[in-house]
Amino acid sequence: MMYNNILIFLSGTLLIATIVLIIKREFSEWVQAYKYQTIVLSIITGVIGYITNNWEIYLAAIITFSLKAVIVPKILIKVTEKINYDFKIETKPYISTRMSLVVSTILVALSYFLTQQIHLGEDVIATSFLPVSISLLLIGLLVMIGRKIALNQIVGLLILENGLFLFALSLTHGISLIIEIGIFIDILVGIVISSILIHRIGYTFDNIDDIHQKPASIEYTEEDD
Amino acid sequence: MPIETSASVSDILIGFIQFMIIIILAPLLTGIMRKIKAITQKRIGSSIFQTYFDILKLMKKNEVISQEVSWIFRFSPWIIFSSTLVVAFFIPIFVVYSPFGLGGDIILVIGLFGLSRFFLMLAGLDVSSAFGGIGVSREMMISSLIEPALFLALFTVAVTYGSTNVEIIMSHTAESSILISASLLFSLFGFFIIVMAETGKIPFDNPATHLELTMVHEAMVLEFSGKSLALIELSQSIKQLLLMSLLINFFIPWGLSTSFSISEMIVGLLVFLLKMVSLGILIAYIETKVAKWRLFRIPDLIFLSLASGLMGIIFLFI
Amino acid sequence: MIRRLIDMINSSITLLLESFLVISIVLTPILGGILVTIFKKKKLVEIISVLSTTFVLFLTFLLLLFIIDFKKITLFNEFFYLDSLSMIILLLISFVGFVSSIYSVNYMGKQYQDGIVDDKHLVRYYQGFNIFLFTMLLVPMINNAGLMWVAIEATTLISVLLIMIYVKEDAIRSAWKYLIIATVGLSFALIGTIFFYYANIHDPLLQVQPEEDKINWTNMLENSKSMDPMIVKIAFIFIIIGYGTKAGIAPMHTWLPDAHSESPTPISAMLSGVLLNCALYGILRFHLISSGSIGPEFSDNLLIIFGLLSVGIASFSILFQKDMKRMLAYSSVENIGIVTLAFGFGGFIAIYGAILHMINHAIVKPLMFFASGKISQKYETKAMSKIKGIITIMPITGIMFLIGGLAIVGLPPFNIFLSKFMILSSGFSSDHILASSVLIIFLAVIFIGFIRNLVMMSFGKPKTQIKSGELGYLSIVSMGMLVAFIIILGIYIPGPLDILIHDAVNIFQQI
C-alpha cells in the first residue's frame, strides 16, 4: 500500500504528541500540548477522508480542527485566567510524571497487543489507527486517575475524547455525520459546563486539596446517641 | 555498496578532509547557534566567529592551576580532547566513509564520549572546590539517565538497519526512503532530546549563565584556564557537531553522498551544511521558546526520551 | 374499493396523528424552556413549567393508546422508533416530570422565600428543568443508537448544571464528580455502541461498508444473527460498564449518592426515578441485540452479577448511612440492582416483575425524595440523627414518608412488594437459586437499616422547638398522587398497563 508509510508516520506522530502531553505540569502547557495533539488528529482525519473518499470525514476534520484545536483551548485559557495559580500547577500528582511515562509506554504496547486479537482483515486504516486510538483512551484514563488537579482531569477527558473520536473513525470509517455533530456539540457544552464549574471551584475552594475530601454531609456525628 | 575495504590514498585523503572539516567547522556551528539565539532574543550578539577568537585568545594565555590538584586535572583536558578527536574519525558527515570505518562501532562512540565525560567529572572533583562538586553530582545524575535513553534510541536504529557499525548504518540510511518505520520516528524524538541534554541546551543546562544554582557543565570547568579551557571548549563544540551530524545522518540522511565523485561530494557537503544550520536554528529556537527546567524535573524530560525509545522498540516487534 | 380507500385514509390519519404526538412531546419542553427564558417572572415561570409537563403527560397518554393498538411505531424514515418498552420509559419520564414540576413550585418557592435562591437562579432552574425533561424524553424515542448516546450525554450535562444551582462547596464537589465519572463512563458506552455498529457493518469477506441506518436498533436487531460473536461480547461489556455507570450500577455508582443528595429535591427525584431508567433502557436494548446474536446466557450472567453486586453494596451502605438523602440515593442503587438482576433472570415472570419494579420504583422514590425535601426544609438539616418526630410536626408529610418507606422495603400491601415477590419467586423457580438466596439476605439487611432509620425519624419527640405544620399544599398534592398510585398498584394493575407490560415482556421473549 502506498499510504502505509504515511499512515504509520502519522500514527507515530500522534503517539509522540500524546506522550509529550504527559510530562507537562502546568495547565496552560497542557492546553498547548493538547492543541498540537488535536492538530495532528485533524490531519489524520483529513488523510482518512482522502483514502475513503468521503466528504463527511473531511467535514469532520474541519470541525475537529476549528472546534477542538481553536475554540476549546481558547475557552479553557480564558476561563482559567483569574484562577489562583495553585489550582493550575501539578506539584504532587498521585502518579509521578516518570511513572506515568513508563506506564503509558506499557499501555501503548498493551493496546497494540489487544488490537492484534481482533481480526481486522485488510483494513489499512483500522490496523494503523485503532491501536493508537485505544492507547489514547487508556492514556487519557491514566491522566485522569493520576492527576490531582481538577483542571488536568479535564485535559485527561479531552485526550480520552480524542481517542474516542479516532476509535470511531478508524473502526467504522466514519459514523454518520449527524452523530458526529451531536458528539461535537456535547463536547462543546461539556467544556462550557466544566469551565463554569472550574470557575466556581476557583472562588469557592481555598485549597486545592479540598475538592478531594469527602462531602461534609457524611461527617455528621450522632450527638445524641 | 560503494565502500571497499581496501582504501586507496585518495580515500584516506577524503577521510582526513572530513575530519578536518569537523574540527574546523565545530566552533563555527557554536557561533552560529549563539548568533541565532541572540537574534531570536532581539539582541545583536557577537560575531559568528567569536568562538574562534575565544579559543585563540585562550591559547595565548597563561594557565593558573591550583596547588591542591593532582595530575588528573592537568591531563584530563588532553584526554577529553583526544577521545573526542577519535570519535571524529569514526563519524562520516557528508560522504559515507571514515578512515577507521571498520572500528567505528556505535557503542564505541558512546563509550568514548563516556570516557571524556568521566575525565571531565574527575577533574571537576579533583579541584575540590564546592562548585566543581555540585556540577559533577548534577552531571552524574543527568548522564546516568541519558545513557540508557541513548542506547535505546540507537538500538532501534541498529536493529532497523541490521548493524551497529556507524558506516554501514549510514550507507543503508543514505539509500532508504522516507522513514521506513514508525520506530525510527520515536528514536528520532528520543535522540533529539538526548542531543539537547548532551550539548547542554536550555531545558537542561544553561552554559551562558554563571549562576551557581543553575549551571551544570560550567561548574565543572570553572577551574580551568588558558590552554586547558581552550581544549575543553573546542572538544565541547566538536562533540556538539558530532552528535548533531549523527542525528542528521541517521534520521534525515537525504543528500548524503555514497560515492567519491567530486560533484556528489560537493552536493553532499552543501546539503549537510544546510541541514546542520537548520537543525541549529531549530535548537536555538527551542532554546528561546522554553524556560530552563528545575534540576529535579530534568529526569522527567529524559524519561520522555526513554519512553519514546521504548515505544520505538515496541514498534519494531509489531 | 371504498373499504380500501377508507383504510388508506385511516392509516394516513393515524400516521399524521402519531407524528404530531411525537413531535409535540419533543417540542413542548423546548418551548417551555424558551418561554421561561422570555418571561422571567416567578409566577409565570412556574405556570409555564407546570403547563408544559402537564401537556407532555397528556400527549404521552394519547400516544399510549396508539402503542397499545399498534405495538410499535416508526416515524420519519425510522428516525423515531417506539415500542412498548420505550413507551413505559416515556410514560415514567412524563409522569415523574409532571409530579416534579408541581412539587418544584412549592419547593423552590420555599427556597426563594428563605433567600437561598434568587430570581436569576429560579429562572435558570426552570430552564434547566425543561431542557432536562427534553433530553430525557428523547432517549427512549430515538432509533439511532449513536444519537441516543448523544441524548444521554446531554442529560448528564444538563443535570450537572441543575446540581450546581446552589453555589456551595458540596454541590460543586459532587457536580464535578458526577460530570467526570459519568462522562468517562459514557465514553465506554460509546465505544460499545461503535463496536455493535462495527459488528453490524463488518463482513469478514468484504470491506467495511458504512451505511446510515445500520446503527439503528431495528436494523441491528434484524441482523443480530450474523454478527461476529467475539465483537458482540466485547461490545456488551463496554455497554454494561458505560451505561451502567449512568444507571448507578455498582461498582460504578460512586457519583450517585453525592449527586442525588446535593441536587435540589425535585431534580433528585427525576435523577433517581427516571434518569437511571433511561440509562438502563440503553443496556436493555443492547441486551436484546446481544441475546439475539450469541444467545441470552452471556448478557444474562453479566446482568445478574452486576445486579447482585449493586444490591449488596447498597445494602451495607444503607445500614451505615447518616444522611437522609444519601440513604435514599443508595436505595436507588439497590432498586436498579434488583431490576438489572431480574432482567438477568429472564423468563416471563421475572421480566414482568422487573418492568413492574422499574415503574414502582419510579413512583415510590420521588415520593421519598419529595417528603425528605420537605422534612429537611423544616428541620434545616439532612442528618438523620437530628430529625425526630416527623409525624407530630408534619402529620400528612410524615405519614406519606412512612408509607413510602414501608413501600420501598417491600412490605405488603404496597406496590413494591408485588414486583419484588414476582422477581424472587421466578428466581427460585428457575435455576438461579443461589442468586435469589443472596438477594434475600441483602434485602433483609436493607430492611433492617431502612426501617430503623425510618422509625427513628418518624416517631419520638422532636428535640428542638420547631413549629408544627405543613409546608404548602402543592407538595401535599404531588405527594398524594404518588401515594395513591402506590396503594392502587399494590392491589391491582390497571388493564392498559398490564397489556403494555405484557407487550414489553414479549419483546424479550421473542429473542
Image (cartoon, grey):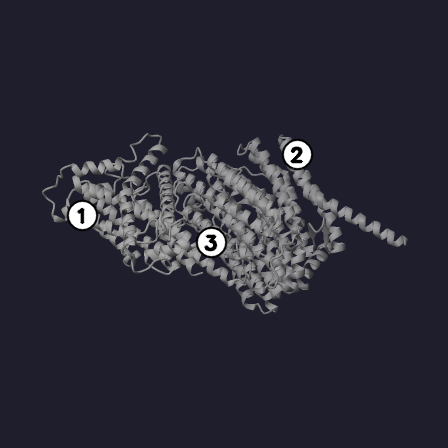
**Quadrant housing residue A106:** bottom left
Residue type at the position of mark 3 = Ser
**Quadrant housing residue C112:** top right
Vertical placement of residue A64 versus B170, above or below: above
For the residue pair C13 and C312, the one nearer the viewer reads as: C13
For the residue pair B1 and C324, the one nearer the viewer reads as: B1
Residue type at the position of mark 1 = Trp
The residue that disc 3 covers is A135
Q: Nearer the viewer, mark 1 or mark 2?
A: 1
Vertical placement of residue C229 versus B75, above or below: below
Whole-number angstrom distance, CA of label 1 to CA of label 2: 86 Å
Vertical placement of residue A205 versus A41, above or below: above
Whole-number angstrom distance, CA of label 2 to CA of label 3: 46 Å
Q: Assign the C terminus of chain C to one quadrant of the image.
A: bottom right
Check whether the beta carbons of the residues at disc 3 and disc 1 lie within 8 A of each other. Answer: no
The crowd level at tag 2 (other Cα within 10 Å; few <14, some 14-19, many 20+) is some
Query: What residue is drawn where x is 31% and y is 43%?
Result: B204
Question: How far across and how far down the image is residue C455, in percent?
Answer: 53, 51
The residue that disc 2 covers is C35
